[in-house]
Image (spheres, helix red, strand yellow):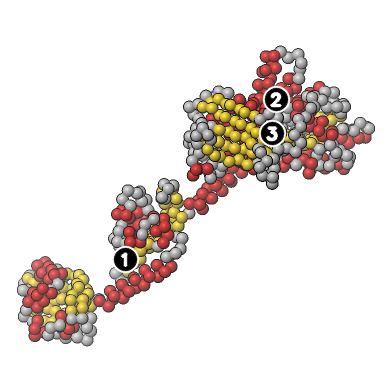
Amino acid sequence: MIDQLGDADLDVLCAVYDRDLRYRSINAAACALIGRSAQEVIGHTVEEVFGERRNPDNLTYLMRARDTGKAQQGTLAVGGPSGEVHLDALYLPLMSDGEVTQIVAIAYNITAHLAARQELAESEETLLRAITEHIPTMCALYDADLRFRYVNDAVLRYTSLRSVDFIGKTNEELFPDRELPFLSLLRAARDTGKTQRGEIALADSGEHDRIFSMAFQPLVDPTTSTITQIVAAAQDVTEERRAQEELRRASKLEALGVLAGGLAHDFNNLLTGVLANVTCAQEDQTLSASSREALHDAELACNRARTLAGQLLTFAGGGAPLRQATPLEGLLTETVAFCLRSSSVSAEIDIEPELPLVDGDSEQIEQVVQNLTMNAMEAMPEGGTLKIRARREPDNNSAAKPSVEICFDDSGRGVPLEQRERIFDPFYSTREGRSGLGLAICFRIVERHHGRLWVEDAPSGGARFVVRLPIAAATSKSTRKEGASGATLRILVMDDEPLVCRAVRRILARVGHEVVVAAHGEEAIESYSKALDAGQPFDLVLLDLTVPGGLGGEETLARLRQLDASVRAIVSSGYAEDPIIANYRDYGFVGAARKPYSSVTLYDAVAGAMSLDVP
């Protein structure tokens, strides 16, 4: 029966061996494979039939089946007349009286199957190459031992290696000194047969971390259920993640800006009461020198507090600056002196004589000076000298507007070239524990002033920050004396903060003006209407822009226009970022007083409003 088994199917080979491993029977398919007839084989051992051509694995399986009495299974590569043939063999021992007397071997020719599988794998690999060769995503193909079979161009560009450097090697062999956190995903894909995904941070050639979204897909042979290859893909998502992080931070900052706006409004209202009363008290000619000095310091502290309150608002959602002809000399010297008052850094300030006034918002420019001074101080933790130079920029470019250039030179370590592109980005800081907002605020303010801000090397070896601001069209300084306001005026003041109303009344009454106060828009409209009816109209109205629970300045002015088309109004607000403050004439006002304001600021606002035509 063994002689005939498999004769109809040349893929099934059968043979029977005795205990001495001599052939007792062999079918035609097996004879065809070894190129011998049954008569030449039967009665002979495997060594006698094959000689040096014998397959050691075949002999091992036979001996193991005989000695253990257990069936054996394995694959063989056998040389035949037509070349190498691959067999999947089963060895069954036959027992008699507890002893193996014969071994039946049945083998299936799997050569064609293996060839088809290899052809399929090669076609899949060819397809993978064709698809991934030139795409930006990094792709690689590993074998079951996690050795590279293929990498695409993106991998070669990232690693600066050649394709031949990869093939046949593992990641550990290629990069023995680098940390490779993705290897756990690669091994898990091989060990579990399941796709593995994750985001991994890797250092690039410049030792900067890049974030990659990675996936490892195992390829399984359906006939054997074994993993033969693993396809790996890695997409650089660094910029996408940075954008998401910046968006998240921006959302936080926007929410914080809304909160800070409300707090700043209340804070500036209270600070107005302090600053207005302090500056009003300074006008008392009977003050002693020590009292005058104390009030001056209190005024400086109020101005610094106002600057600090506006820092976050300027960055988070600040509006256009309230630009006017602004002198820089006093602003520079006082701000720098205040910032460095308790530090080990000294300042050398060189201001060109008769420096032109700049077209700018004095409060926002003060923020720039303060932030750049603090930045220089932090760059010199062990002390040093901050050199500040302000001069008119030569008109080398006729197309550019005339400008004033201010240079801040520190003697620190300087700013490396690779950091200069990002140094003005929000939240970017090279110093631990810093917010990264200071220079971003400076850049945003200068940009809104149609100026320029950049960093370069200072002659001292440290950093030089350069600010350019446009020169004001009219550069003559005001000659109006403090308190000078011309004729006596009837002024209506609308503000929801009693402290502000009392301070404004005190300041304006000091120079002879008659002041009526109102807590909200409805009360102001009623007072204005009664004054008209009584033939005692108001010459000027000072309106707070925001009144919680009532009519604010903009709505109140619209209603007053219905009563009197020639109403003359100044807008006032603690919301420094509100666009109405910067562009007050576009909204029908003749002046603006940004809180907190001093007595001099209030006098100037009143005199300026009375000298302008109603929009």
- What whole-number distance in Å separates the C-alpha atoms at marks 1 and 3? 72 Å
How many other residues sit within 10 Å of disc 3, few (<14), some (14-19) or many (≥20)? some
Residue situated furthest front in the rendering: 396
Q: Is residue 547 left or right of residue 436?
A: right
Q: Which mark is residue 362?
A: 3
Label 2 or label 3, whichever comes before in sequence order: 2
Q: Quadrant of residue 14?
A: bottom left
Q: Amino acid at mark 1?
A: Thr
How many other residues sit within 10 Å of disc 1, few (<14), some (14-19) or many (≥20)? some
Q: Which mark is residue 205?
A: none
In front: label 1 or label 3 = 3
- What whole-number distance in Å separates the C-alpha atoms at marks 2 and 3? 20 Å
Q: Which residue is mark 1?
A: 228
Label 2: state its secondary structure.
helix
Q: Nearer the viewer, residue 420 or 475?
A: 475
Q: Nearer the viewer, residue 521 or 81?
A: 81
Q: Position of residue 533 (x, y in %)?
A: 93, 35
